[in-house]
Image (cartoon, rainbow, N blue to C red):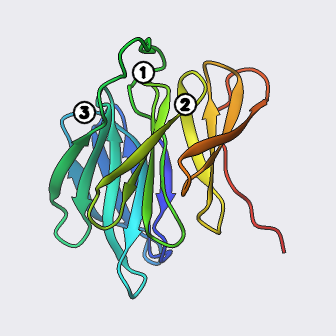
Amino acid sequence: HNTYVTPDCRYVVAGSIAGKTATVIDVETETTVWVKHFDLGVRPMAFETNADGSTRRMFVQLSELNGFAVVDFATQEETTRIELPKIAPGKKPVFEGGNASHGLAVTADNSTLVVDSRLNSAVYMYSLPDLRLLGSVDVGIAPDWVTLTPDSRTAYVANAGSNSVSVVDIRELREVTRIPVGQVPKRNITALLP
C-alpha cells in the first residue's frame, strides 16, 4: 500500500493490502529483515521510538478495522489491537474508501499518536507510551491522511469526502480551521525547508 522509513532511517517498511503483510527492509543491505503477517490488509503505519532513537513499536492500520494494531518492533509480535470509540449518537458513519480508519502519525516529541477514523469523521489522540485515549476532534467527512508539524502541536487532516483539510490543535483537541482544497485530498505531508 505504501512504504515508510523508520525514524532512525535504518529500515523501510512496505505494507501490502493483498498480501496482508508489513515487510521490513534493511536500508543499508537492501534485504528483507522480517515480514509480519496480519489477518487483514495493511494500510498506513507510524512508528514510536525508544530513548536512543531506535524503533520501539509500529502502529498499523488494517483494512476494515476502525482502529490499529500495535507491533513490538524488537520481538515482531502484535501486542494488541485498539478499536477506536464507537460513532457518537446522531452522527452518520461514512462507508467509503476501502477501510474504516486511514491515516495515523506519531508526534515528533514521541508523546502522542494521532489516528484518523474515516468511519467516524473524527481524529483521535492517544498518549504514548501507554496508549490512553486523550480525546477526539470531529473533522470533515472521511478523513484519509494526516501529517503533523515538527513542533508536535498541529495535525493537518485530509478530508477526502468533504474536499477539505482540517487544521487540528493536538494539545487543545480542537479544529482550528478547515481549508477547502479541491477534489478528494489524500496523501498530505509536512516538508521542512532550509
**Mark 2 to mark 1: distance in Å?**
12 Å
Q: Secondary structure at mark 3?
A: loop
Along the polypeptide, which appears first: circle 2 or circle 1? 1
Residue 41 shown left or right of residue 99 in the figure? left
Q: Position of residue 108 (x, y in %)?
A: 54, 69
Q: Nearer the viewer, residue 191 or 36?
A: 191
Residue at 17% in and 54% down: 78
The disc placed on residue 40 is 3
The disc placed on residue 98 is 1
Q: Residue furthest toward the bottom?
A: 52
**In the rendered image, which quarter contains the N terminus?**
top left
Instruction: In the rendered view, tell whether residue 92 sits above or below residue 11.
Output: above
Residue at 15% in and 57% down: 79
Q: Nearer the viewer, residue 52 or 86?
A: 86
Q: Position of residue 53 (x, y in %)?
A: 43, 82
The disc placed on residue 10 is none
Residue at 34% in and 54% down: 59
Q: Secondary structure at mark 1?
A: loop
Q: Position of residue 113 (x, y in %)?
A: 42, 56
Q: Residue furthest toward the right?
A: 194
Residue 164 shown left or right of residue 172 in the figure? right
The local crowd at label 1, few if under 14, some if 14 to 19, many if 20 or more residues have their Cα within 10 Å, is: few
Mark 3–mark 1 contact, CB under 8 Å? no
Write down the quadrant of residue 72 in the picture. Answer: bottom left
Instruction: In the rendered view, tell whether residue 75 sits above or below residue 50.
Output: above
Q: Amino acid at mark 3?
A: Leu
